[in-house]
Image (cartoon, helix red, strand yellow):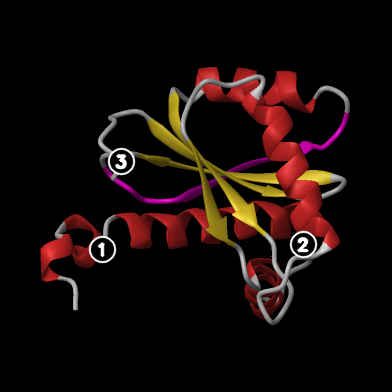
Amino acid sequence: MLTSTGSILALDVGGKRIGVAVANAIARIASPLTTLQNDAAIMQNLQELIRKQDVTHLVLGLPRGLHGQRTAQTEAVEVFAAELKRYIDIPLYWQDEAVTSRQAEAELSARGKPYRKEAIDVLAATYILEDFLAEQFSPASAHPEQAA
């Protein structure tokens, strides 16, 4: 259970870009924040963003195949997370990111306005964070003795 008063940051890690969403640990409302280039400066850029946003918890979307199987992207994100742990000293959580990118693309398409791929990434990160918050703060997780 999260008990901090800082921010929670969620990442949708892709090969070229990383979508970033943020929520205040008290208000627990996920908001799109930015998209970062996944390049040689990413760890430094994430450290700076974590500092600026007063991040106390970090959530990474865990990609899986349609049937829950591991994929090449699953392994790539796990390698990214292992590298990231060398640069940060805050708790890191995994959140299933099943179809978040497709969900984001569908929502953006439904708006009927042009959008860039970066918009998909940041919205997918927001969905990842919303899912994480819903699981962490559901009545069942807050009061395990009441869970069915």
Residue 122 location, x and y as percent? Answer: 65, 51
Which of labels 2 and 1 is toward the front? 1
Q: Is residue 147 left or right of residue 70?
A: left
Dot 3 alpha-carbon crowd within 10 angstroms: few under 14, some 14 to 19, many 20 or more: some
- In the rendered image, which residue does mark 1 sit on? 138
Q: Is residue 116 visible?
A: no
Q: Quadrant of the C terminus?
A: bottom left
Residue 144 location, x and y as percent? Answer: 18, 62
- For badge 1, the amino acid type reads Ser
For image coordinates 46% across by 32% down, the residue present is 91
Residue 85 lies, with reference to residue 113, above or below; the image says: above
Q: On the image, which quarter does residue 68 sit in?
A: bottom right
Q: On the image, which quarter does residue 73 sit in?
A: bottom right
Span highlighted in magenta in the image: 27-39
Under circle 3, the secondary element is loop
For image coordinates 36% across by 51% down, the residue present is 29
Q: Is residue 45 left or right of residue 16?
A: left
Magenta segment includes 107: no
Dot 1 alpha-carbon crowd within 10 angstroms: few under 14, some 14 to 19, many 20 or more: few
- In the rendered image, which residue does mark 3 sit on? 2
Q: Is residue 127 visible?
A: yes
- In the rendered image, which residue does mark 2 sit on? 115
Under circle 1, the secondary element is loop
Residue 98 location, x and y as percent? Answer: 62, 71
For image coordinates 60% across by 24% down, the residue present is 49
Residue 77 lies, with reference to residue 99, above or below; the image says: above
